[in-house]
Amino acid sequence: MSTPEKVLEEKLINQLTAGVSQWTYRPDIRTEEQLWQNFREKLEKNNVAVLNGIKLTDSEMEQIKEKLLQEAATTYKAACWLSGEHRVVQVSLVRENASLGTVHLQVLNNKEIAGGNSSYEIINQFFREGTERERRFDVSLLINGIPLIHIELKNANHPFMDAFRQIKKYCREGQFKGLFGFVQMFVVSNGVETRYIAANRNGDMNEKFLSRWVNEKNEPVDDYISFAKDVLNIPAAHLMVGKYSVIDQEKRKLVLLRPYQIHAIDKIKEASRNQKSGFVWHTTGSGKTLTSYTVTKNLLDIPSIDKTIFLIDRRDLDQQTSDEFKSYAENDDIDIEDTARTAVLEEKLLSDSRIAIVTTIQKLQNLLRKYSREPLSQKQEKIRQKLKSKHLAFVIDECHRTVAPETKREIERFFDKPGKKSLWYGFTGSPIFDKNKRPVKGDLPRTTEQLFGKVLHTYTIKEAIKDGAVLGFQIQSLGHSEEQMRQLALDNKLFTESELENKSPEDIESAVIDHYEKHGGFYSTDEHKNQVIDYIINKSDTKFNLKAGEGNTYEGILTCSSISEAQRYYELIKAFKNSGKVGKHILQQLPDFPKVAITYTVGENEESAEVNQGCMKKSLDDYNRMFNKNYGLEDIAAYNSDLNKRLARKLPIYGAREEQLDLVIVVDRLLTGFDAPCLSTIFLDRAPMKPQHLIQAFSRTNRVFDHDKYYGQICTMQYPASYAKKIDEALVLYSLGSSGDVSAPDWKTTKGKLKDAVRRLRNIAHSSKDATDLVDDAELAEFISAFQAVDRYLGSARVYDEFLGIDIRKQFGISLEEIEQYCGAYQNAIEKLKALRQGKGESEQVSPVEFDYELNSIKTTEVNYKYLIALIQSHIPVSGDTEAREITEEEDKKICAYIDEYKKSNPHIGQIVEQVWFEVRMNPMNFEDQDAWTIVQERVQEIISKEISEFSRKWFVSEQEVGAEAMSWKAGDQVHLTGDYEGYKSSGNPLSKLRYMSELRKAAESFFNDTVVPFRKF
């Protein structure tokens, strides 16, 4: 028998308060009123001097309360306020006694961690009034009276995901309001598995971003008590929300660092104190830029360091990194100074301010060469000496590419002096080892360790996949089979039969391709390119997830070996599309597919520069027409920046289909250091690259995104045998294991799992009709689990090419029509089991069930509410945002059409969305910085509250009682309302008490069914 949730709570609280602990348990705080009163006491205690000993009046407290509620309007706004000014959070107050003036009260000081005026309290079973009894929060952690961490627990009979779904449900219901609107971190656990995630009060949290805690050796810490010891003690908990959280201004989201990021930061801090350099090996896609930003910021805490310099490569390659730094620093106590010109860099370096500087390696080199020349004037010599006196720490993302050994040596010769060397911290997802070291060049370093020093922290792709920080790879090699290559070698008399016996598949392949390239081409022909184009456009709809509909599809990159090849591909794709070769089955899913762009570095002095510029001019004209832009050749940097943002889709504006791309053709641009979670596939029509370059390119695809994105998908269009060998070697090298640790299972394995899942489903219920006859708890739970497994493996199977065009009934023993029929029985089974388990104790539940599991493979075609809200959000202005969109008549018509379509299936919510869109359209600035999801939700709650109030007055039932019943009631449930018969009678109503109770139940059932339930269906 599993441990009851109540006991789990008690053990957690005992752990946090045991021994030398700064946590205090407050069982007396259970209601909103008590929570505010406790906050008031903390505020008065920490501001005795500011208040001159005169306590807050009730009117003043209402003023403070109103200001805090405004700050907690959205999770993003709350996080910005909690970041404070110089890490001190304050609230201004106009004293009721005018002679006392205006005062600024300190609410929280994130510099006083585990000391000063910081107080730490634990509450549990907080009761949210106006909801049913189950709307109680398990355990919440308060810092200075504000709930900043909330923990939801389930017993081992339930997966920890049930706790996460419960939190999302509470969010959708608007339960995290008031002071709970400031919660920054959610923790979910079933005792044996524990995860944490950055809070988002509107419930828009992707389960794939749930983080598992690991120790310094990357060993998992799953048990909730062990998790509490590592993460929820003081100072760890306060550090997590006060120092290891970053606000992404561009995405309008709070980000909590993952454990490996925290450990790396601590290791660099330790190394810097000992005046040692080193590098961090964190797999690409695991958030190196965020880690390096936090390191850049934290190094300024060390008094001996004058400035930290974050070095990036050429601006046209790394605009995204620079933008991300600025986005993180917007609400942080750090001055990120970009350096548009070398003169600005010189000015920043010479200043006495202790700041972090983001600059390119090229600008730094230009500056140092300026002051390394001889002779220098007296003034220049003075500047040189001042520059050389600076003690600098350099942080380098993608360090294997950004800083060459000779460049680093040049910088060190300028800044290093006896007893005080510059510090260097490199970040890379693909270090250079002895196996793939650089060519010999004098005595220059040839590996990453030789260049930067020992590795300070390692987090490989294998560990990242295991933790869910990134996805694995599904790798497909298209082209001639090994047998076909052998036959071509014989046909062209390249080898004899006996010679072939001693040749490797790679050697045979290379010989055949070389022969054909000398005699008309093999991979360089238009025929080959058109075959690739047909595959990408007509046979890769699952890779682009076209079934997800407008705004929710994925993107791809096509990379080839040269600019001329890229240009030819762009022309051929346009011709392919214009000649009507895009398949009907593709156009039915996405009528304007594919939307294509091209990007490469346009040289001015190269021999082919004129041709390149001419071709780029044509593609720019296409881009300008597609997205209503006006870029010319002189605006290439701006064009690349716009393309990067459009491809990354991190701003609300790019949630709309009109602003999205499907495919970008590149040579080398975007293959390193570029982050776009919605990018799912890379098509490589080029010869195999070096191991580090392969891993970098592959890692553009395996960012965590949504439910449907199972893997990063790799399609090689050339050299299948050579690629197979090179890929295997690269994956082994960079996973410290076998390629099987990071690659998706082959088709045979996936097909077998789906077959087994269908077989299990048939054994439980041979048909959907049999499923409707299931009534026992255990049988229902088994059927639900089996159908979820079919759905899960069907979704996984869909991404394989082998799935296309097969007879599913013949291959797996079930048709799609049957699966849809089972789906109806599955939904009924969920409701049956919920009803069976209602009111039962935990020990009576036979087996755990994922009640809120989201079906991935069986989708309805009705308008997606989330996409509809995203469209509206893309038109809500953001303060300081220069990318605000003008609402055109065409866009307005489209959104109105979506709303009309949505109203057909959900008229109640649809009417509210329609009104919100009308108001946004009329005056967008009234909604600046607001969250569309929250706006709709709050209006829904207002309507429900108003209707409940009217029902309560009519039938003499307390609003709290009606509200509690309304939020959980579903068709078929009995109504349990007590009512106030005496009040009802004294108002002149003639019914007897028995008749009154009967009519009250009927009226409540009708009210819940017709008025309340429709507003719960998002």
Image: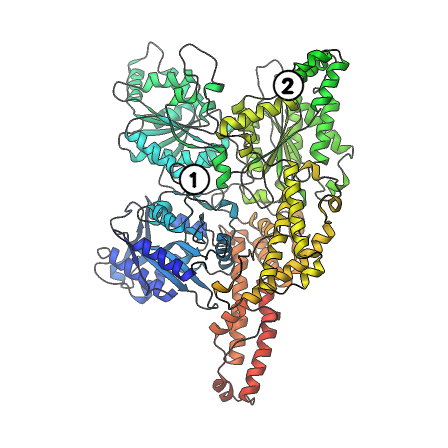
Q: How is the image coloured?
A: rainbow
The residue that appears at 57% across and 47% down in the rendered structure is: 874
Mark 2 residue crowding within 10 angstroms, few (<14) / some (14–19) / many (20+):
some
Q: Is residue 646 left or right of residue 538?
A: left
Q: Is residue 298 above or below residue 275?
A: below
Q: What percent of the width, then of the height, locates residue 540? A: 68, 36
Please state which amino acid type lies under the numbered disc 2: Glu
Task: Name the secondary structure under disc 1.
Answer: helix
Q: Where residue 93 appears, x then y in whole percent?
A: 31, 57
Residue 1002 as seen in the image, left or right of residue 36: right
The residue tagged 2 is 506
Horizontal side of 334 relative to 784 (left or right) equals: left
Q: Is residue 909 visible?
A: no
Question: Which residue occupies the foreground of this view, 631 or 969?
Answer: 969
Viewer-proximal residue among 574 and 725: 725
Judge the density around disc 1: few (<14), some (14-19), many (≥20) Cα neighbours within 10 Å: many
Above or below 915: residue 184: above
**Disc 1 to disc 2, C-alpha distance:** 47 Å
Q: Quadrant of residue 383?
A: top left
Looking at the rendered image, the disc whose residue lies closer to the viewer, 1 or 2, is: 2
How far across and how far down the image is residue 638, in percent? 55, 31
Q: Which residue is mark 1?
A: 328
Q: Quadrant of residue 744?
A: top right
Q: Earlier in the sequence, mark 1 or mark 2?
A: 1
- Name which residue type carries label 1: Tyr
Tag 2's secondary structure? helix
The quadrant of the picture occupied by the C terminus is: bottom right
Task: State the residue in front, 969 or 867.
Answer: 969
